[in-house]
Amino acid sequence: MLKKWGQRLFFSLILLAVFIGYPWYNVMNPADRTVARGLTPDGVILAAQQHITLWGVSLAAAIVVGVGFGILITRPRFRFLAPILVNIVNIGQTVPSLAVLAIFMGILGMGFRTAVFAIFLYSILSILRNTYAGIMGVAPDILEAARGMGMSPFRILLRIELPLALAVIMAGVRTASVVNVGAATLATFIAGGGLGTIIVTGLAVMRDQMFLTGAVMAASLAVLLDYLLSIVEAEVS
Amino acid sequence: MITLENVTKIYNPGDAPAVKDLKMEIEEGDTAVLVGPSGCGKTTTMKMINRLIEPTEGTIYVNGEDTSKVNPIRLRLNIGYVIQEIGLFPHMSIAENIATVPRELKWPKSKIQERVEELLHMVGLDPEIFRERKPRDLSGGQRQRIGVARCLAADPPVLLMDEPFGALDPITRARLQNEFLRIQEQIRKTIVFVTHDIDEAIKMGTKIAVMNEGELVQYDTPEDLLSTPKNEFVVGMVGGNYSIKRLHLKRVNEIIDREPPTVSAEEPVSKVKELLEASKVGVVMVVDGNNRLEGVVIPADLKKSGERVGEIMNEPKVTSDVGATLNDALSVMLTNGEGYALITDENERLEGYITLNQIMEALQDNA
Amino acid sequence: MSDLIDFMSRRQDQIVQFTIEHFWLILVAMAFAVVIGVVIGILITYWEPIAYPVINVTQIIMTIPSIAMIAILIPLFGIGFSNGVAALALYALLPIVRNTYTGIKAIDRAVIESAIGMGMKESGILLRIKLPLALPVIMAGIRVSTVMGIGIGAIAAYIGAGGLGSFIFWGISRVNFPMIWTGAIFISILAILADVLLGWFEKMLSLRS
């Protein structure tokens, strides 16, 4: 038991060390003035903050909306919506995230807010589908027993359907998170900020040190966040 | 306690009714068994009592109240409900499963805990072991017992049971039926029981309702049903030989001989020799200080070497439990090729024995 | 809207050219990924202890944002087509390796045992029983990888791998909205088409077995 948590702490700390240590080193030891100008402590911290905010806000909102609608389309009155919505989800998920960002830029203009909104919409998809699948997957005899015993539909949702669907929902959240972090890295292309900015600037001035810093930060952050979510997923299964 | 007045159920207009103009009165403490072929409307009828299905016409009264005027959730919280698959909640412990309805009724925690413990004892499962287990760790028979415990949790006056023992193997089913009868003797609920098995109906029911194609064909006590079947259909339904069917009716404890010849394992072989000669069945039972059955001794055993009874005794094979019907006891005798069956209670204490002759005599007397 | 249609008709040739580039990028990458992925997938079915770690590593690769991966690969593959192929292939590995592994593992033991009983050698069993039976599942993995690859290919255009992503990046830098939309729309069409076609193919394979 302790070993398990010890292991988890260990890996998390290693990832965190890379996420912080690598850029720190490069900021402290710029190869030349271009790099020094591009990799400022403030700039790097800002990019990281934007990235985490982009990821966090859109994911949190996507969970609320995704789970909410997912539950809605399992209710008898709204079940007719399910095939339509699930189809939209399936098609939507095939569209690459870069295209989604570009499309929203066309509608809402450039900037951080557009990026958050676009990524939020994109990540609703897998959460909604998994919520629907998770709840519909609850065995009918369990539902019949619950109903026959006198539980109201709300109580059944709260005490039976959601707890049993939780593992599947969590898997959907995790998928959404990975997609989310990836899209957040691309936000820079529509002036949304994030760690992608460091990568892109580094590529523009052709300085390995710069774009690798951005890349390693984005990569280690992505792996760390997914690792943390995998721990949550394991604990609720 | 439960009155069904002209109850009809039609699923789609133009279809034949699933239940047609049903009139039935179930008294308090009765176990009314609805029996009939697939599609006869027995499950539909039962489900109309707790409004899982709404009647198209007619009224149902439970405890004097018109069920259509009561909030369905409140109605169901006050009626116990068990289905064939049981539907135990896999993510909850056994204790939490049992506590479902009390929790919905907002009972205080301590009262719930007590009740769970009480119910686990009642269905023969040790609370210490089973309270925190999950349904997946349990056998089919154990799950079924929890299902029964769960439906009794809030002490509802009425129980609805839809083929509750249907998914079990015959041996476990017989055992659970017996235990349930024992429990019912203590708690005296009003029960509506659905089954397609006429033998189960005869064994479990105080009144039997034979249904066919949505109609109530005959509603009588098991004895009356067997002796005066109303028509060809009922005869076909009941099937078999009247006498043999009556084996399902009578219980072992109606004819049991409670003064069996017993010895303890410590006693000398000479003592058992005397008893064997006196014994009607040619067998002597070996019990411990608590009257728990340890073994049997037959004349052939006297040839074995040994000073004490314990050294020459055999494993008791031909046993049945207290709630068993004559049919169960006869099965056990025939399987083992013996003319007697030893009767034990749930703690393996010897209650007595019955013989083949006694069974035949019992069948000769009229009901 | 009319600007868009106008743009698309004017730039038809370019659209076709970029689509072919994109297509080619994916084809080469998937060729590598399928060969390497299926081989690894088969190997780990024989070597249980490393199965889980291998799948874990490929899973970690998938979590890394594609543009970061592309950047990290620059020291190794430079910029351009080969970088794009490498990045796409790496991402395609997880679905293919995992599906090959689970597809083979899911085969009914009885089928394999009867083959052994009949005297078939492992190579024969692999080629004539395991792979054919696992094929639908492997195909599903290929489908998922391909659709994902189209998205990553779009990003690879940024470092000169070519393809429809070029429209998006040029469009953004020149603030040319019809160009951006063209890129987005055609990439989406390509992705949906690939999903549908490969999905149909996958269904055909599973019906046959």
Image (cartoon, rainbow, N blue to C red):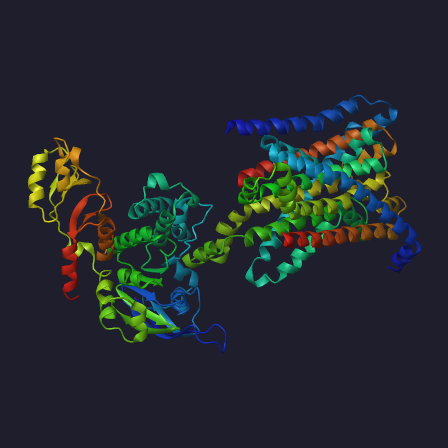
> Between C13 and B45, which is closer to the camera in this rendering?
C13
Q: Position of residue B150 (x, y in %)?
A: 37, 51
Work out whether B349 lies above or below B33.
Answer: above
Give how far across and how far down residue A78 sits, in percent.
59, 61
How many numbered marks appear?
Answer: 0
Choose between A80 and A141: the one closer to the eye: A141
The residue positioned farthest toward the bottom in the image shown: B14
Relative vertical location of residue B218 with respect to residue C163 in this rendering, above or below? below
Taking C145 as reference, is B182 above or below it?
below
Quadrant into which the N terminus of chain B falls: bottom left
Residue B276 in view of the camera? yes
Name which quarter of the figure residue B125 lies in.
top left
> Is residue C91 visible in this depiction of the protein?
no
Percent across and percent down for residue C54 are 65, 33
Q: Residue at x 73, y 38 (%)?
A: C35
The quarter of the picture where residue B232 lies is: bottom left
Q: Is residue B268 left or right of residue A174?
A: left
Quarter of the figure with the C terminus of chain B: bottom left
Q: Nearer the viewer, residue C167 or A198?
A: C167
Q: What x and y, as percent, mark residue C45?
A: 61, 36
Which residue is nearer to you in this view: C6 or B309?
Answer: B309
Q: Residue furthest top?
A: A29
Q: Is B266 left, or right, of B60 in this rendering?
A: left
Q: Residue furthest front?
A: C119
Horizontal arrangement in the rendering, residue A160 relative to residue C146 (left or right): left
